[in-house]
Amino acid sequence: MNRTAVVTGAASPRGIGRATALLLAERGWNIGVLDIDFAGGQALASEITTQYNVKTWAVAADVADEAQVRTAIDELEAALPPLAALANIAGVSSPVPYLELTSDEWHRVININLNGVHYVTRRVAESMVRHEYGRIVSVSSTSAQRGGGTYSKTPYSVAKAGVIGLTRALARELGSYGITVNAIAPGPIDTDIMGGPLTPDRRAAMAADLLVNRIGDPHDIASAIAFLSTEDAGYITGQTLNIDGGLYMH
């Protein structure tokens, strides 16, 4: 397979992005790493190259800055085989209660978690349309569907709900070009975005809400992103897949 998957937010050591980049590389994808942490992204890229013998390239960009995003993806496209998959994973948490919420915090979270997904997708979609093929998967959250109830609160829930709306609209607009667009809504996952390490008490409290007796881990999400990025998933688009241990059932 001489195709590339772009993964945003992949540099975090315990994150979904890293797990996704490693799993896609294991399955033969070339990997474009886009992260605000350039050193971390470079380290991951070299690790992937050594371990899986695929082409990798790391670029630095703040996803909330459209000019940075476009420049970074131009660089990825020049360095790697055709961009055929995109995993929008970069994001930030926000535990601030609504009545204490500042305008700055609102815009920070919306800019990274929603506008960032749009900026990256917009640029990658241009390349996918030219090749008439693509798989786009964005990470939303059960927080979008439940109105919070997680570590993060209002602006996070709003941004992640926006990701679901964006996913559906893009699926409708890009389908004729051979591009599928889907979202994943994770429940509690053991990553740093949960607000630090999960203590045994905190873990038990979260698991009490679930139908399975454990918190999710990054591989649970990565494996679904990897599936939705395959040829086999070509008849799935505009969907939000909940991977949440049964926390939220429609």
Image (tube, rainbow, N blue to C red):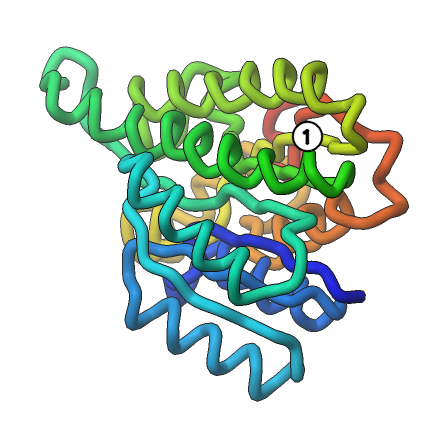
Say whether residue 10 is visible: yes
Say if 209 sits above or below 70 in the image.
above
Say which quarter of the image contains residue 129: top right
Nearer to us in this view, 215 or 153:
153
**Quarter of the figure with the C terminus:** top right
Say which quarter of the image contains residue 110: top left
- Rendered residue at 49%/37% (across/down): 123
Nearer to us in this view, 123 or 7:
123
Side (left or right) of 205 relative to 244:
left
Residue 69 placement (x, y as % from top left): 37, 43
Side (left or right) of 117 relative to 126:
left
- Rendered residue at 49%/17% (across/down): 146
Residue 98 placement (x, y as % from top left): 20, 14
- Rendered residue at 56%/36% (across/down): 138
Nearer to us in this view, 206 or 48:
48
Q: Which residue is mark 1?
A: 181
Say which quarter of the image contains residue 5: bottom right
* Mark 1 closeness class: few <14, some 14–19, many ≥20 residues within 10 Å: many
Residue 200 placement (x, y as % from top left): 39, 56
Residue 59 placement (x, y as % from top left): 38, 61
- Rendered residue at 58%/32% (across/down): 185
Say if 198 sits above or below 54 in the image.
above
Helix, strand, or loop for circle 1?
strand
Residue farthest to the bottom, as pictured: 50
Q: Which amino acid, by three-letter code, is at mark 1?
A: Val
Say whether residue 93 is visible: no
**Quarter of the figure with the N terminus:** bottom right
Say if 171 sits above or below 138 in the image.
above
